[in-house]
Structures are given as structure tokens and as C-alpha cells.
Image (cartoon, helix red, strand yellow):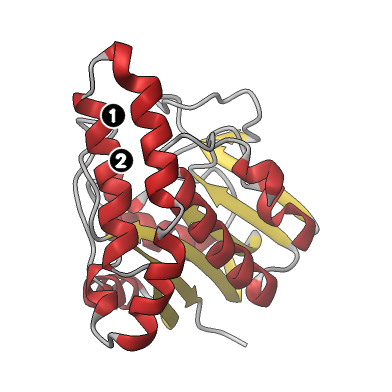
């Protein structure tokens, strides 16, 4: 996990949510991943540092228009057209990609196609997040929308889990906002303020989620564990 988190500097507003999402992805992968894994929208394949040790083979696919370094990609394709035969993989991982797809149901049907019967897919998708990677930023998802979308595509839902409460969502977006409006000369100071302000957020977030039953309504992202029907 340390290698995975090294891609997010301590001063980055996303560092806090990267740590949280890494724990969720790792936990889901330990329970459900085996055999051959396909990472859809893999970028530079840095998630291999997070889950690669749990599978026999880690294959990454991404498209030519990706903003990420593609030097480590194993195959070029899209979420709509993965260049492999059906039932080629035992599990699939796709993080923070669904919001960038015009036709998410089509993409889910394609990932379902390449999975073995009984295979598991782990996805993450935001409910609250600022615009990013414009103009390819199309949707935000509630847990109910995710359940509907995956079920309609043919998956069986195993779980949909919120990753945070209000305070982590608010603090991360606050950090991004501060950096977006700060003059260049003040950015080092603002980054230091972000780090200091974020120190208190994880324990406050944990306390909020323990005592406030509706705290999950403000989760910035959900993790979906879904299964292809079969033995």
C-alpha cells in the first residue's frame, strides 16, 4: 500500500481519500480476487502495488486518449471494447472510471462479458466530486443508482459501501478549492494548511459515522462489489 500511496504526495488534497479508498479496495480484493485480474482504465498500472500480490496475473487495459502514462499498459482498448475473448478473467477492477463514460451500462456489459461465471468485479464511483478531466466528466452516482445500473447490466450485487461521511468529503473538496484559488506564491503555505487541517479529519469522520446513522449520505465515493452470475 505504501508504494500505491507514494503516487499521492502528502501535501495533495487527494492523499486522505487515496488512503481511505486504498483500504477499501485492498479489503475487497483480499476477499474476492483470484486468478487473472483485469484492471480497466489502468493508467500507469499503479494499482498493481495495491492488489497485484493477490492474483496470479495482473493485466491492465487503457485507451489511447488517456491522460495517464501508458508505457506500462498491457493492451490498448476501451471500457466498451476490451480486446480479449469472453470469460478470459476471474476478476476485474475499475476505479474512478464510470463517471467518465457516456454509456456506463454498455461498459458494464463489456466487463461482464470478459469475466468467468462467478467472477467478481470491484468498481469505485463518486457521488460528490468537483469537475475533473473535462470534458470527459459525465455522471455522479448514488448507491441506489449504482445498484440499479449494475443489476440492469447483468451483475449480481454483493455490496455497495460508502467510503466516508460528511467531514472527509468536505475537507478534501475544501483542500482542492483552496489550492485552485490561491495565488502561486502562496501555494506552499496553502499546502501546509491542507496537511494540518486534514490531520483531524479521519478520527472525526470515524466518530461521525459511528454516532450519526445518516453520515453516509455525504460519502464522496462508493465501492461496488458485483458478481457475474454462475457457479
Q: Give the residue at x 38% y 63%.
A: 109
Q: Which residue is mark 2?
A: 175
- For numbered disc 1, what is the local secondary structure? helix
Mark 1 and mark 2 residues within 8 Å of each other at the beta carbon: yes
The answer to whether 209 is drawn above or below residue 222 in the figure is below
The answer to whether 88 is drawn above or below residue 163 in the figure is above
Q: Quadrant of residue 221?
A: bottom left
Q: Quadrant of residue 177?
A: top left
Is residue 122 at all visible to an observer of this figure?
yes
Is residue 153 toward the left or the right of residue 86 in the image? left
Disc 1 residue crowd, few under 14, some 14–19, many 20+, Cα 10 Å: some
Residue 112 lies, in percent from the top left, at: 47, 65
Residue 217 lies, in percent from the top left, at: 22, 75
Nearest the eye: 12 or 157:
12
Q: Give the residue at x 49% y 59%.
A: 21
Q: From the image, which quarter does the C terminus lie in?
A: bottom right
Q: Give the residue at x 23% y 56%.
A: 128
Is residue 226 toward the left or the right of residue 131 in the image? right
Q: Which residue is mark 1?
A: 179
Amino acid at each position: 500500500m505504501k508504494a500505491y500511496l507514494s503516487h499521492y504526495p502528502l501535501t495533495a488534497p487527494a492523499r486522505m481519500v487515496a488512503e481511505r479508498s486504498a483500504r477499501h479496495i485492498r479489503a475487497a480484493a483480499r476477499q474476492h480476487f483470484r486468478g487473472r485480474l483485469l484492471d480497466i482504465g489502468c493508467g500507469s498500472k499503479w494499482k498493481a502495488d495495491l492488489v497485484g500480490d493477490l492474483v496470479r496475473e495482473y493485466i491492465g487495459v487503457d485507451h489511447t486518449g488517456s491522460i495517464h502514462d501508458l508505457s506500462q499498459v498491457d493492451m490498448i482498448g476501451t471500457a466498451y471494447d476490451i480486446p480479449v475473448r469472453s470469460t478470459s478473467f476471474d476478476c476485474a477492477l475499475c476505479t474512478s472510471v464510470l463517471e467518465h463514460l457516456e454509456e456506463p451500462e454498455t461498459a458494464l456489459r463489456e466487463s461482464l462479458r470478459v469475466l468467468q461465471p462467478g467472477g467478481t468485479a470491484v468498481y469505485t464511483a463518486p457521488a460528490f466530486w468537483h469537475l475533473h478531466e473535462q470534458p470527459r466528466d459525465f455522471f455522479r452516482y448514488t448507491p441506489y443508482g449504482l445498484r440499479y445500473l449494475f443489476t440492469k447490466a447483468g451483475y449480481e450485487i454483493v455490496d455497495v459501501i460508502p467510503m466516508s461521511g460528511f467531514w472527509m468529503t468536505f475537507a478534501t473538496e475544501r483542500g482542492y478549492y483552496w489550492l485552485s484559488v490561491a495565488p502561486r506564491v502562496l501555494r506552499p503555505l496553502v499546502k501546509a494548511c491542507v496537511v494540518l487541517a486534514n490531520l483531524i479529519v479521519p478520527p472525526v469522520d470515524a466518530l461521525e459515522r459511528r454516532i450519526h446513522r445518516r453520515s453516509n449520505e455525504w460519502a464522496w465515493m462508493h465501492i461496488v462489489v458485483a458478481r457475474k452470475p454462475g457457479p
